[in-house]
Every structure is written in C-alpha cells, then in structure tokens.
Amino acid sequence: MTDIDAFRDSDDSDDGENGAAEKEPSLFYGSADEFVRERLRYMYARRVGPGNASFRWAARWWEYPEALARVDALWRAWEHLRLDGATGSSTWWIEHADHHMPILMSPEGPFAKSEDKNNAGDPLPYDPPPPELFPDMREN
C-alpha cells in the first residue's frame, strides 16, 4: 500500500473490470429453525424432561416468544462469527451460547412447563414448525 492509498475512500479502489463489489458471504443455515434442526439440538445433547430434570427444552421451541428471540439471536451470531476463522467459534460459545442456553434450558426458563423429554446423549426434542414460519433467508 502506498501513502496515497491510506487517503482513498473505499469507493476509489479498483473493483475489477466490471466494478462489482465484493460478494457478501451467504448464510450457511437459511433460518433459525434450520440452525436448531441441523446443529443446535445436536450440540446440546443433554437429558431434558419435566419434574426434577435439570434441563428443559420444548420440541416446539418456536411457540415460545422468548425462545424464538433467543434462538434467532444465537443463529444470527453464529452466522456472523463462523466467518472469523481465528476466534469466532470461541466468541460464539462464550458470548452467545453460554449466555442464552442456560436461560433457555433452565427449569425456570421459557420451557419450565414443557413435558418433552429425551434420553441421555440424544439430541434435544424437535418438532418441525409450519413451513411458512421460517422462510429460507438464502432465497431473499
């Protein structure tokens, strides 16, 4: 980089012959539901259930407004941080998953009255939502 490059606006840079801007990375998962279905429920293979169980989860998690908001935040943070090959994964765990998941899975959390259960080591319970609830954001 030359001294003059430090003073150029980003619009002054050479974008190639067509002047096309750098393409934004696409989403890995098209929705928060796909993120739960394909990744999150396998990452948290804890035994959940009613009564004296230490953790709660609802197979129809998307029917709980707080859970919907928190899972959406987890998905969006994961999509952003996955592009950071250095510390993105650790940052996602420490600043996002380690914050939201204990709240979601707490016996006093949004799923406190859930009767859904699984066996130790199994993925979290899951029921598919209505398709129109989670359109694939990669298609927008």
Image: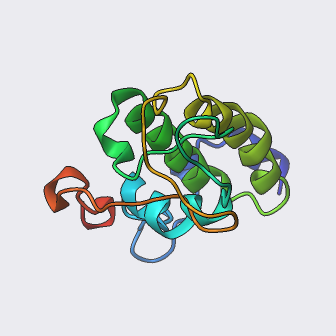
Q: Residue at x 20, y 51 (%)?
A: 133
Residue situated in front as seen by the camera: 91 or 4: 91
Q: Residue at x 33, y 49 (%)?
A: 60
Q: Quadrant of the N terminus?
A: bottom right
Q: Residue furthest front?
A: 51
Q: Is residue 115 above or below residue 107?
A: below
Q: Position of residue 82 (x, y in %)?
A: 66, 59
Farthest-out residue, bottom: 17
Q: Is residue 114 above or below residue 132?
A: above
Picture quadrant of residue 136: bottom left
Quadrant (top left, top right, bottom left, bottom right) of the C terminus: bottom left
Residue under the point 85% across and 59% down: 86
Image quarter for residue 107?
top right
Apparent side of residue 87 relative to residue 35 in the rendered image (left or right):
right
In-image side of 78 versus 76 (left or right): right
| Residue 89 vs residue 97, the one in the foreground | 97
Q: Compared with residue 82, is residue 110 higher up or lower down, i.e. above or below?
A: above
**Residue situated in front as seen by the camera: 123 or 88:** 123
Could one spot residue 26 in this view of the protein? no
Q: Residue at x 55, y 60 (%)?
A: 118
Name the colouring of the figure: rainbow
Where is residue 5? Give x, y as percent.
74, 49
Total number of numbered discs in the rendering: 0
Q: For the view shown, which residue lies furthest in the top direction?
A: 108
Image x and y of residue 57, in percent = 51, 44
Judged left or right of residue 2, residue 84 is left
Residue 78 in sight here? yes
